[in-house]
Image: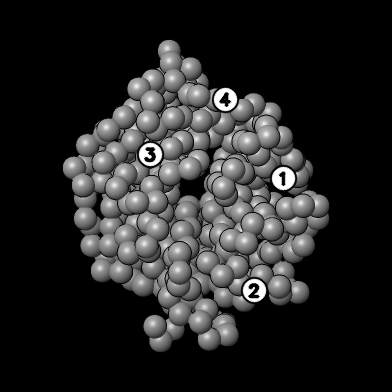
Amino acid sequence: VFMGESGWPTRPSKPFKSHTGTVNAIRFNRSGQYCASAGADKTVRLWNPHKQLLVKTYSGHGYEVADVTISRDNNSFASCGGDKLVFLWDVASGKTVRRFGGSRDGGHNGRMNCISFCGMDDSLLVTGSYDTTLKFWDVRSRSSEPVQTLTGARDSVSSIGVRDHLVLSGSVDGAARVHDVRTGTITMDHIGSPLVDVKFSNDGNCLLAASLDDAVRLLDRATGEVLALYQGHSNSQFRLECSLLHDDSIVVCGSEDGRVALWDIVQTEKEPKSFRKAHQKSVSSISVHPTRREFLSASQDGSIVLWKPPGD
């Protein structure tokens, strides 16, 4: 097994069981001290992953929870899923502060796949759905209706990424779209194979896209040119996630065989430099630490693993 240049996070922790059934999403908070997980068991759970400690369980969704997003101030988080509703939670009390959506209130008419805080001071939430739309919700408004709906995707919206006034979305129609919410313009990069995850690079100059042709691509955001192609993992069936470490040095992606692949962002060969198994089933979610070369992986087997460089 390749151990990488020093500082590659190739050492997995012992997996810890987090949910009954699939962990659909794992998300570090802004400090990297805690993380939230969203489960097929209809709960969101708050963890200290460094101590493998469950802090709190949040119940309220009637169907599986697909995704979770944590506010910058760590006081609240929002979740979405199969019940087509957005829940805004108070971290400390464990209570839902607000609920958005519902078909009567202009909400999504298909399951929600992804959610993210956006806007100044996290004043908005954006969600992507099986119904092909993106919807924006005003966190401070009394209304449970969306403030804006973006159409354009011709199939399910699988993932979203937010950077300042830009919202990136990936769709099963094979396209990555960057929506500039200030100007209302959309730029589109057509990859062809169904997209399961999209991310902005941390410097904002590139897009990272994972698709169902067993590939991850790095694209130039300005031109749409494919700068690199990363392969060697398996991804032809399930939604899983890719990411860049906080310093944009290493590409991370889950694999359907329970392994996690790491590539050097500038490497010339397509095969991963590190490809280690840590889960018994497909790796469904990845979350990178905000300041350190560490990341979390979560799986359909219900477990979470924290990855660090050897020796840390």
Frontmost of labels 2 and 4 is: 4
The amino acid sitting under disc 1 is Ser
Q: Is residue 268 above or below residue 53?
A: below
Categorize mark 3 by other alpha carbons within 10 Å: few (<14), some (14-19), many (20+): many
Marks 2 & 3, CB-CB < 8 Å contact: no
Q: Earlier in the sequence, mark 4 or mark 3?
A: 3
| Disc 2 packing (10 Å; few <14; some 14–19; many ≥20) | many
Task: Estimate how packed mark 1 is, as few (under 14), some (14 to 19) or many (20 or more) residues with alpha carbons within 10 Å.
Answer: some
Residue 46: percent from the left, percent from the top? 28, 52
The location of residue 247, given as percent across then percent down, is 56, 70
The kind of secondary structure element at disc 4 is strand
- Residue 114 visible, this orientation: no
Q: Quadrant of residue 101?
A: top left
Q: Residue under circle 2?
A: 264
Q: Look at 71% across and 73% down and name the residue there.
A: 266
Q: Residue at x 34, y 57 (%)?
A: 35
Q: Is residue 211 visible?
A: yes
Three-letter amino acid code of the residue under disc 2: Asp
Residue position for label 3: 79
Q: Nearer the viewer, mark 2 or mark 1?
A: 2
Residue on which disc 4 sits? 149
Q: CA distance from mark 2 to mark 1?
A: 23 Å
Mark 1 and mark 3 in contact? Answer it, CB < 8 Å. Answer: no
Residue under the image location 39 percent in, 51 percent down? 72
Left or right of 250, for residue 94: left
Earlier residue among tags 2 and 4: 4
The kind of residue tagged 3 is Ser
Q: Determine whether the residue tagged by mark 3 lies in a helix, strand or loop.
A: strand
Residue tagged 1: 193
